[in-house]
Amino acid sequence: MIVEMEKYTFLVYHKEYTAFLEKLREIGVVHVAHKPGGVPDDEALRTNLQLVARLKSVLKILEKRIVENQQFEKAEAADGMQVLEKVEGYLQEQEKLSQQRLVLEKEIERMTPWGSFSWERIHQLEDQGLEIRFYGCVSSKFQEEWKTQYHALEVASVNSMLYFITITAGESFELDADLLRLSPKNVVQLQEELSLLKEDYQKIDQSVTDCVKFIESIKATQHKVFESVDMRRVELNTTAEADNSVMILQGYAPTEDSGILKEKMKEDGIFYLAEKPLKEDHHVPVKLKNSKFIKPFEFIGSLYELPNYHKTDLTPYFGPFYAFFFGFCFADAAYGMLLAGVGIYFYSRVRKEMQQVMRLLIYLGVSAFVMGIVTGNFGGIELYDIKTASHWYKAVENLMLTPVKLFYASLIVGAIQVIFGQFVRAISRMKTDGFSHTISTWGWLIVVLGSVGILGLQKGGMISPEQAKIPYYIVFGIGGVCIFILNHPGHNILINIGEGLWDTYEKATGWLGDVLSYIRLFAISVAGAVLAIVFNSLATTMSGSTPVVSQLAMILILLFGHSINIFMAILSSFVHPLRLTFVEFYKNAGFVGGGKSYKPFARYKEEFKLL
């Protein structure tokens, strides 16, 4: 259900405007309307948004370093901005050291073949008129005569590369090898330098970790900056009139909170105008309020988009279907018990925002358990094969569906949801646009439901085919008039007939495709069951006959196989009902999205987002 909103227009004297905004924030129920064209560019806002990004980045780094049972200093113990700048400084130093480390490691790799030698000794030889050159080449290219001609000495051979030096009296010559320019430090000196650099890096890293205890100070600063951003956005969405002496602010508040808002405005003598949002107003925020049972399914709906404020929230209508479809696909009593057990175990152990997800998990697990019984599947064990004289088992066995019946069941539930969607469409549109806009939809419902009802009576032997003719004529007659004549009251009758024919074509092709789409429920259900049976079979046939070893092998195969099957079943059972909801059901129910989430101007409160 979408919570009803009221649109407010506040007129405030400019000298009292700041105090008014503070009061409005304390009340925390007004969603400020944005000016057409969006918030104008503003230096202060841009600076604060950049600061928010810096704070988020540093907080993310510090939160990763929190250890179990860590104690934090109070927020007042340090200046959040100073801590932020200190951590950023450390991180910049670390980045600089990381780059130096990469360079050093490359130098060490390059100098390793030459080992530890003294540049001082080489310079002494050069002072004596000798020239030392450093070369590298593929071993096969090295020529033995270089040893006599240029006094070549092999230093090292690494893989296929040969490193050598030549000692000459300074004469000019060229070799078919790479003349190398070495680092002014040998490998030992470079390794010592790298070791010192790593020590410096560790010291700085420890300094960053030491700042974790001041994380509350950074969060406090973040809260202040967030509030400054919110305040500035509200100011930028304010319109100044009468030579900037009167400030006008528009916003929306839930009708259920209007009492406290109006009371506070009256206390402060603030002039305001409250009115019901017009149908043309597409900026009204959306706040959903559903029953305890339906609320977990709001998470499913949020994966698509919020409904338009002036339309209908479909969560109560698709929620039960979604749970049923998930169970239909998962369809394993053992897996369902496991899923529900996980939800029950973690429900009281997770933060409040996650409890709705755990509740949803319990619903889905229960649905999977029930459908597992109906399809006769318990962790890959076919319940049909159990032979017992138990009366309760006989009663359960009568509920089980064969694969053929399961196939037809998937089509039947699909047809039910498609028709239910049309019913929801008719009711919703009748509320928002009036009965005249729903006559055609009612006509189709009369034709479909009437025909099914008469056919049912006929199959049940309550009426004969001859007796069924008149009810059919009545149903098709009334439905035909609604679909072809009264579909658009006030329009030319010929145009109505043409549109009725086009509507008939769309319904015939669209509904057929929609209903066939529900076969996926059957396919996923059977695929999961078959895989479970296969893993059970593999565990019994591949585990061998060696005592203890065979049992261990069987357990490993079962754990591995069923883990994969559960993962794949959860994935497909979650995604495919989503598609049936957002495509087939939303289309038939006439879902209109584009709703904007209700975000009141209030004191900063840390948000938790699952996605």
Image (tube, rainbow, N blue to C red):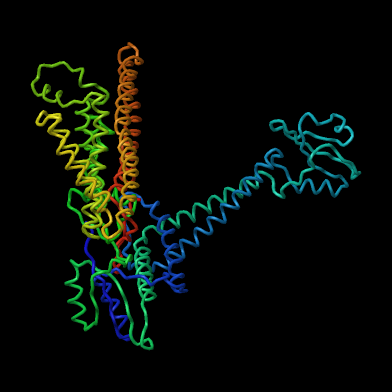
Q: Is residue 364 above or below residue 430?
A: above
x and y percentages locating residue 87 in the rendered image: 46, 61
Compared to residue 244, the image places residue 152 above or below, namely above
Say which of 42 and 372 sits in front.
Answer: 372
Drawn side of residue 427 relative to residue 391, left or right: right
Q: Which picture quadrant has residue 248?
A: bottom left
Which of the 4 image quadrants contains residue 544? top left
Is residue 433 rendered to the left or right of residue 239? Answer: left
Q: Position of residue 493 (x, y in %)?
A: 29, 55
Q: Position of residue 310 (x, y in %)?
A: 27, 61
Please state which of residues 264 and 58 is positioned toward the viewer in this rendering: 264
Q: Residue 147 is drawn in which quadrant?
A: top right
Is residue 177 visible to us here?
Answer: yes
Apparent side of residue 607 relative to residue 443 in the rendered image (left or right)? right
Image quadrant in which the N terminus is located: bottom left
The residue positioned 18% from the left and 66% from the top of the image is 256
- The front one of 102 and 425 is 425
Please tell me which residue lies in front, 287 or 539. Answer: 287
